[in-house]
Amino acid sequence: MKIDRRSFLSFLIGGGAGTALSPLPWKLMDDSSIWTQMWPWTPVPEDGEASYVNSACTLCPGGCGITVRKIDDRAVKIEGMKGHPVNNGGLCILGLSGLQLLYGPTRVKTPLKRVGKRGQGSWEKISWKDAISEVAKILSDLRSTGQSHTVGCISDSDRGTVPRLFERFLTVYGSPNLMRTSSIIDSYELTLHLMQGVQASPGFDFENADFILSFGSGIIDGWGSPVRMFRANSAWRNTGGKIIQIEPRLSNTAAKSDKWIPANPGTEAALALGIAHVIIKESLYDAEFVDNYSAGFEDWKRFVLDKYGPDSVATITGIDNTTIIALARSFARASKPLAICGRGQGTTPGSLDECTTVHALNALVGNINKQGGIFAVAEPDYINWPEVEMDATAAIGMQKDRLDGAGSKKYPFSRYLLNRLPQAINSGEKYPLKALFVGDANPLYTMSDSKAVKKAFDKVPFVVSFSSYMNETAQNADLILPNHAYLERYEDIPTPPGMPKPVISLTRPVVEPQLNTKHTGDIIILLAKAMGGNIADAFAWNSYDACLKETLGNKWQVMIKKGFWSYPDFFVQTHEESFDTISGKFEFVSKETGSLKQFKPVNIEGDKTNYPLLLMPYDSIRLANGVIGNPPFVMKSVDDTVLKGNNVFIEINPKTAGEQGLREGQLAMLSTPVGKAKVKVHLFDGIMPGLVALPRGLGHTAFDDYLAGKGINFNELIGPVEDPVSGLDTAWGIRVKLAKV
Amino acid sequence: MSALDDNAKEIAEDAGGEEIATSSREINTKEQDNGAGGPIILFFIIGLFASLILGWVIFPKLLYSKKKQPIDFNHVLHVAEVEDGCESCHFFREDGTYSGVPKLEQCIDCHDEIQGISHDEIKFVEKYVSKGREVPWLIYSRQPDCVFFSHAAHVKAAKIDCVTCHGHIGESENLKIYEESRITGYSRDIWGKSIGGFKKNTWDRMKMDDCAECHRKNTANISRTGVKTPTNRLIGHIIDLVSPGTSVSNKGGSVQTERDACFVCHK
Ligand code: SF4
């Protein structure tokens, strides 16, 4: 028998028929379709018991309440907490992505000690015991040689128990150098201090206001407490509230406002004075308030009427005088007008003149301490620890001038001037900083003039970071003592910026600590105990949790149950009681400084000939630019006209681009007096000619691969400009030139 | 003569030639006969049978890997000890979700100490209970992740008993070998023990057609829960997807997910 081609074909046909009659093809088809759902990158939700834990978000200062959905022991979804006074169920994109920070690769997994050169990224694991005794030893040595004041601490906030524990530690140890990351809140606090004589934060009753005059504040770009602002903005849509946005660039806020008025950059304060001029001249102001509860009005009136008529303001701001007059009238005639300032997300304090002028507008229309107006919100006084007993060393240390110059003769009113620290260290004019604690902050990324900041850090021999994540500052520290992530720890979150009513939220462990981390509060307590003596005595608590529980007292139970504590009757503030100035009234011209009479525009860095254009930062809710960088989910939301690959786009008006010979998508070299960067060009009709805008929040060197190395950190291109009265950073931009590459 | 001879020779040659030609034709015919019958059919049959054996016998052996459960479990013994039958361990949580396979938490009341002397019991307590580790049970009825199935709707609302879908597992004394598809990672029990997909009992298979079969039978007049198979009423699905709730056949969709069409049962 010979096997030939025919037999083979016949075999195949038989095989085919048999296969068709067997389950093989059908079963394979079915299984392979199921297999396509089983690829390792396909996210599969956990199966198990669902539960919810109420907590608070700490990823920005917004202070939102969150409800975290868990399946068994794993957190699977973050939602906004319903009924929370700040966000009532809402949540921002960063808050939603918090789980990527909890479970992601950017966490510092265990205490680390630097082994290679600073910033090189070589670490060795160290036990908690060794880490704490190492810090204790360095601090003890400094203290015993009378250098306690050379220890500093940077924190994102000075409110709440953890920053207060830092403060307490430094006090009893003997250093005045606690510094807080600055923001528009610094300017507002100073404004309230100078004009109303109070130590308080501003509280804006947006929910009841009906005419918002925003001097560049990114109402839906992350200003204030972001989710609360979104909600207020949506509410105005329904109630007919109006937003007038004054800003040289068409931001999201401007695009969604009722009227966008592009003023020449940096001239917002002049515009506010122009508006005041019209209101005063036409007697549209609240005479009842001005006559009975204010002082210095006549002086201020003369100054405003003399110098800031609509015509001269029109020249300064580039807005025509009829618009200014109409704006002033509608602001004064609105039933609940409210003027606010702080550019973008309010991450830079801006000029004090600007803030006081905008606040004066509110006073003119009498909306101080009024529904829909602005309140001075004192810090809730729930932290009542026993006074510390300072020994002689501590007393001497505390008497030393602060390194940043806050409270000095030059800047007597400011409490913190972190922006001045790099210069103080680099110039060495006062005294060196020998050790620096960095709490919940990332100064190496968030402070302007990155190069100078880095140089200053390099001069500090011992830097300790308490960060949960490997951020820029942690990368350049000598020791990292990682805090639990926010979903693993207890912490009180005091009133977020701009809330008219004080509220304390409770961050609560949603899951057990996943890594070998320790609560910063516990580290401070352990450190104090390791130092012994008075220092140990000032920290009698066994643990941070015990300290927090004791501090909150009867509030604790309520907060555990509800997730927050609110003070219901805080609205009752009378004009008679609320001004604590020399005159006992609202002071249009502060008797302490007289600053408003010498109103001066801010001089930004750079000369016109070498740097013909102006560079301004812009903020977006899709780009976190604070302590936390964008997690991957948020990164995904960034448009490719903002970032493409590793290239960031500048926004520039087509007219200006034409003059510079630049086309859409072209690469250009951008240089300012501070730094240089390669950028791509995006033509945008919504930006005033002569301006260049660059987003904040990019150019990280730390965090994960989705963020690091993408775009430029705006802070590398700009340096601080000191306000003559407050010493705070007033720079709103910098001069720049563009060249083709 | 020579001419004759030549002629004869020629004839003879012709004849011979013809003879040869004839015989060779005969051979050809013979060969052709053989080819049309025997070998070709034989090869067809070999192919047929080989593939049938491959498909029905060898393929399932290759497809499924056999795994033993981490420890053995005796349902009979436990059912006798507990009060609420299946629901004692496989219970509904307060929010209506179903607990499925028990966790240590349910075992620990009795098993915080070793009960009896069986090898599996000792292993259970030592390896899992005392270390607080969950037993990595292999779940025979685990459905692909895209399936949304609510026990509450079926057990509480429709009053279907466990046996209907899970069979008489509650009467077993041992856990059977877990056969896992090497391609999908799911249990053989979903497709059914029979590789041909034949079933005798309702619990023999757990594929979508089996859901559909029961739904068609028992909920034919309740349009809200009418489950459809992929091939039929595709158009209905498309209508549902494009404008949910408008098709007569499927008003409202799922009570729980408030979704329509495919999304009643699929995520
Ligand atoms: S606004 Fe801030 S606090 Fe609120 S959810 Fe977003 S990141 Fe968290």
Image (cartoon, coloured by chain):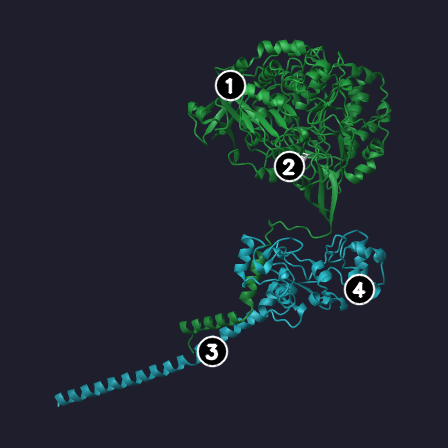
Chain colours: A green, B cyan
Q: Which chain is disc 3 placed on?
A: B
Quadrant housing the N terminus of chain A: bottom left
Q: Which residue is mark 3?
A: B42
Q: Position of residue A622 (x, y in %)?
A: 59, 35
The answer as to whether the residues below labels 4 and 1 share one chain is no
Q: CA distance from mark 4 to mark 1?
A: 83 Å
Q: Which mark is drawn over residue A320?
A: 1
Of labels 3 and 2, the one closer to you = 2
Chain of the residue on which disc 4 is drawn: B
- Amino acid, disc 3: Leu
Say if residue A431 shows up in the picture: no
The 10 Å Cα crowd at callout 3, few under 14, some 14 to 19, many 20 or more, is some
Judging from the image, what secondary structure is the residue with disc 3 in?
A: helix
Tag 4: residue type?
Gly
Where on the picture, by quarter, is residue A80? top right
Q: Of the residues shown, which amino acid type is indicated by label 2? A: Leu
Q: CA distance from mark 4 to mark 3?
A: 59 Å
Element type where label 4 sits in the image: helix
Q: Residues within 10 Å of mark 4 (few under 14, many from 20)?
A: few
Q: Is residue A484 above or below residue A426?
A: below
Looking at the rendered structure, whether the residues under marks 2 and 1 are on a common chain is answered as: yes
Q: Is mark 2 within 8 Å of ligand 1?
A: yes
Q: CA distance from mark 2 to mark 4?
A: 47 Å
Lower sequence index among marks 2 and 1: 2
* Side of A572 relative to A418 (left or right): right
Could you say which is closer to the camera, residue B111 or residue A196?
A: A196
Q: Which residue is mark 4?
A: B85
The residue tagged 2 is: A94
Could you confirm whether marks 2 and 4 are on the same chain? no
